[in-house]
Amino acid sequence: MCIGKLTVALALQPLLAGSHVLHNHELIDPVGKDHPRGGPYYQLKRAEYRQSRLKPIIHDHCLRDTIFIFTDSQTEHNECVGDYTELALSEHARRFYSVILHCEAKENERRLMMPGMGIEAGNGKLTDVEVLREYRAKGGT
Protein backbone atom coordinates (compact mmCIF):
# COMPACT_ATOMS: atom_id res chain seq x y z
CA MET A 1 0.00 0.00 0.00
CA CYS A 2 1.30 3.43 -0.93
CA ILE A 3 0.66 6.23 1.53
CA GLY A 4 1.16 9.87 0.64
CA LYS A 5 0.15 13.33 1.81
CA LEU A 6 -3.48 13.03 0.75
CA THR A 7 -3.90 9.66 2.48
CA VAL A 8 -2.49 11.10 5.71
CA ALA A 9 -4.61 14.25 5.40
CA LEU A 10 -7.79 12.23 4.89
CA ALA A 11 -6.94 10.06 7.91
CA LEU A 12 -6.29 13.19 9.99
CA GLN A 13 -9.54 14.91 9.00
CA PRO A 14 -11.92 12.84 11.19
CA LEU A 15 -9.62 13.43 14.16
CA LEU A 16 -9.91 17.23 13.82
CA ALA A 17 -13.52 18.29 14.32
CA GLY A 18 -14.63 20.87 11.77
CA SER A 19 -11.69 20.30 9.44
CA HIS A 20 -11.53 20.39 5.66
CA VAL A 21 -8.87 18.88 3.39
CA LEU A 22 -7.73 21.13 0.56
CA HIS A 23 -5.71 18.87 -1.68
CA ASN A 24 -2.92 20.49 -3.67
CA HIS A 25 -4.31 19.13 -6.93
CA GLU A 26 -7.57 21.01 -6.36
CA LEU A 27 -5.45 24.14 -6.71
CA ILE A 28 -3.24 23.19 -9.66
CA ASP A 29 -5.01 20.64 -11.87
CA PRO A 30 -7.71 23.08 -13.09
CA VAL A 31 -4.98 25.48 -14.24
CA GLY A 32 -3.06 22.73 -16.04
CA LYS A 33 -6.06 22.08 -18.28
CA ASP A 34 -5.63 25.47 -19.97
CA HIS A 35 -1.97 26.24 -19.26
CA PRO A 36 0.53 23.36 -19.45
CA ARG A 37 3.19 23.12 -16.76
CA GLY A 38 6.31 24.85 -17.94
CA GLY A 39 4.28 27.08 -20.26
CA PRO A 40 4.74 30.86 -20.12
CA TYR A 41 1.56 31.54 -18.11
CA TYR A 42 1.31 28.46 -15.92
CA GLN A 43 2.86 29.87 -12.72
CA LEU A 44 0.97 33.17 -13.03
CA LYS A 45 -2.38 31.45 -13.65
CA ARG A 46 -1.69 28.94 -10.89
CA ALA A 47 -1.06 31.78 -8.40
CA GLU A 48 -4.20 33.61 -9.53
CA TYR A 49 -6.32 30.48 -9.19
CA ARG A 50 -4.88 29.61 -5.77
CA GLN A 51 -5.61 33.15 -4.57
CA SER A 52 -9.18 32.92 -5.88
CA ARG A 53 -9.66 29.79 -3.75
CA LEU A 54 -7.85 31.02 -0.62
CA LYS A 55 -9.13 34.62 -0.35
CA PRO A 56 -12.72 33.53 0.36
CA ILE A 57 -11.41 31.27 3.13
CA ILE A 58 -9.70 34.25 4.76
CA HIS A 59 -12.74 36.51 4.57
CA ASP A 60 -15.65 34.11 5.13
CA HIS A 61 -16.75 34.58 8.74
CA CYS A 62 -18.54 31.21 8.64
CA LEU A 63 -15.20 29.46 8.13
CA ARG A 64 -13.45 31.08 11.10
CA ASP A 65 -13.48 27.87 13.16
CA THR A 66 -12.69 25.53 10.28
CA ILE A 67 -9.31 23.84 10.34
CA PHE A 68 -7.79 23.48 6.88
CA ILE A 69 -5.45 20.61 6.03
CA PHE A 70 -3.23 21.27 3.01
CA THR A 71 -1.19 18.74 1.00
CA ASP A 72 1.20 20.95 -0.99
CA SER A 73 4.87 20.32 -1.38
CA GLN A 74 6.45 22.64 1.18
CA THR A 75 9.82 23.69 -0.15
CA GLU A 76 11.66 26.97 0.04
CA HIS A 77 10.94 27.70 -3.63
CA ASN A 78 7.21 26.93 -3.34
CA GLU A 79 5.27 30.17 -3.81
CA CYS A 80 2.30 28.68 -1.94
CA VAL A 81 4.04 29.03 1.43
CA GLY A 82 3.48 32.81 1.41
CA ASP A 83 -0.23 32.30 0.75
CA TYR A 84 -0.52 30.03 3.77
CA THR A 85 1.37 32.51 5.90
CA GLU A 86 -1.22 35.13 4.94
CA LEU A 87 -3.97 32.66 5.78
CA ALA A 88 -2.53 32.12 9.25
CA LEU A 89 -1.46 35.69 10.06
CA SER A 90 -4.19 37.86 8.57
CA GLU A 91 -6.56 39.70 10.90
CA HIS A 92 -9.05 36.93 10.05
CA ALA A 93 -6.49 34.21 10.79
CA ARG A 94 -7.44 30.63 10.03
CA ARG A 95 -6.05 27.49 11.61
CA PHE A 96 -4.43 25.03 9.27
CA TYR A 97 -2.24 22.00 9.22
CA SER A 98 0.17 21.21 6.45
CA VAL A 99 0.86 17.51 5.88
CA ILE A 100 4.59 17.22 5.20
CA LEU A 101 6.15 13.85 4.53
CA HIS A 102 9.84 13.25 3.98
CA CYS A 103 10.79 10.61 1.46
CA GLU A 104 14.18 9.34 0.36
CA ALA A 105 15.07 10.35 -3.21
CA LYS A 106 15.06 6.79 -4.63
CA GLU A 107 11.69 6.03 -3.02
CA ASN A 108 10.32 9.34 -4.28
CA GLU A 109 11.42 8.45 -7.82
CA ARG A 110 9.94 4.95 -7.52
CA ARG A 111 6.59 6.41 -6.49
CA LEU A 112 6.49 8.55 -9.64
CA MET A 113 6.33 5.40 -11.75
CA MET A 114 3.43 3.82 -9.86
CA PRO A 115 0.01 3.32 -11.46
CA GLY A 116 -2.36 6.15 -10.64
CA MET A 117 0.17 8.90 -11.19
CA GLY A 118 0.05 11.64 -13.78
CA ILE A 119 -2.19 12.72 -16.59
CA GLU A 120 -2.85 9.18 -17.79
CA ALA A 121 -4.53 8.57 -14.43
CA GLY A 122 -6.62 11.74 -14.76
CA ASN A 123 -4.58 13.89 -12.39
CA GLY A 124 -1.69 16.29 -12.68
CA LYS A 125 0.65 14.50 -10.31
CA LEU A 126 4.30 14.81 -11.15
CA THR A 127 5.74 11.90 -13.13
CA ASP A 128 8.92 13.39 -14.59
CA VAL A 129 11.96 12.17 -12.64
CA GLU A 130 14.16 15.02 -13.89
CA VAL A 131 11.64 17.63 -12.71
CA LEU A 132 11.47 15.86 -9.34
CA ARG A 133 15.25 15.98 -9.06
CA GLU A 134 15.19 19.73 -9.81
CA TYR A 135 12.52 20.33 -7.14
CA ARG A 136 14.44 18.30 -4.58
CA ALA A 137 17.69 20.14 -5.41
CA LYS A 138 15.98 23.52 -4.96
CA GLY A 139 14.29 22.43 -1.74
CA GLY A 140 17.42 20.97 -0.23
CA THR A 141 15.85 17.52 0.39
Image: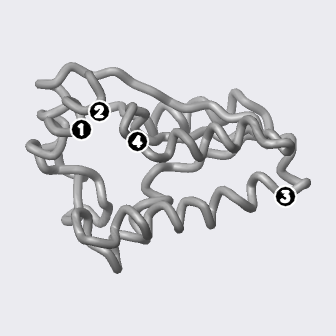
Q: CA distance from mark 3 to mark 1?
A: 34 Å
Is any atom of residue 1 visible in this view?
no
Q: Counting residues from the N terminus, which is met first, the one under dot 3 or under dot 1?
A: 3
Could you tell me residue 136's position as x and y percent? 22, 31
Under mark 3, the amino acid is Asp
Query: Does 66 sit left or right of 8 as displayed?
Result: right
Could you tell me residue 91's position as x and y percent? 85, 42
Q: Nearer the viewer, residue 18 or 131?
A: 131
Q: Secondary structure at mark 2?
A: loop
Residue at 64% x, 36% y is 13
The label on residue 2 is: 2
Could you tell me residue 6's position as x and y percent? 45, 40
Of marks 2 and 4, the one in the foreground: 4
Q: Which residue is mark 4?
A: 78
Query: Does 134 sit left or right of 125 as displayed?
Result: left
> Could you tell me if the residues under marks 4 and 3 are in contact, i.e. CB atoms within 8 Å?
no
Q: CA distance from mark 4 to mark 3?
A: 25 Å
Of marks 4 and 3, the one in the foreground: 4
Residue at 59% x, 46% y is 83
Q: Nearer the viewer, residue 102 or 18?
A: 102
